[in-house]
Image: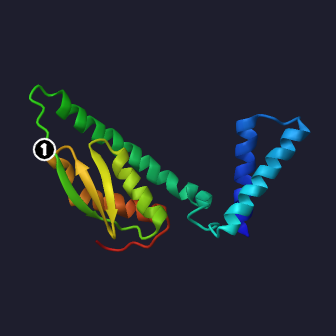
Amino acid sequence: MGYKILLIATLTVLWLTLSGYFDKPLLLSLGVLSVFISIGVAWRMRILDNESVPYLRMFALLPYWGWLAIEIVKSSITISAVILRPDMVLTPRLIRVKTLPQSSFGRTLFANSITLTPGTVSIDIDDDEIIVHTLIKEMTAREDFAEMARRCAKAVGERHVSF
């Protein structure tokens, strides 16, 4: 029930923000109707859970996003230095990285975080591993991925499991 109420509030705020209509009864009623149809469809599909309505996790994700932003900047500087060198030595690699998060939301967040970091791209998720392409050999350090996986698991509320 809590997920329904949270999703109703989120969709209502989103609809009002995007439409900008606050004084037209017909449009407001159509907005209310669309919100309740969306909730009905999600409830019928049985997808109202922590992963489909992760808004309660937003405050737990804020420190992770801050840390990720710093990592993106550091990686951008590293990749820029490699690309701007006159000899530009690229040493691409494919590696398998163990995923620490067990939930679909956690694994998706981890894979997207890898892809957002310049110089790395998540190619495939295979069971409990992600296949990652890196531009330079220095970005294949397992401990860097392990740190990201630990922080990601903590952000989505999962227990710390060792690698």
Residue picked out by circle 1: 91
Q: Position of residue 26 (x, y in %)?
A: 89, 40
Q: Residue at x 36, y 64 (%)?
A: 150
Q: Residue at x 43, y 58 (%)?
A: 108
Q: Position of residue 137 (x, y in %)?
A: 15, 48
Q: How many neighbours does mark 1 have within 10 angstroms: few (below 14), some (14-19), or many (20 or more)?
A: few
Q: Classify 52 as above or below 161.
A: above
* 29 left or right of 79 in image: right
* 132 left or right of 109 in image: left
Q: Residue at x 51, y 51 (%)?
A: 62
Of residue 67 and residue 100, the one placed in the foreground of this image is 100
User: In the current view of this chain or complex, which residue is farthest to the top?
Assistant: 86
Of residue 91 and residue 79, the one placed in the foreground of this image is 91
* 21 left or right of 102 in image: right
How many tags in the picture?
1
Considering the image in quadrants, where does the N terminus appear? bottom right
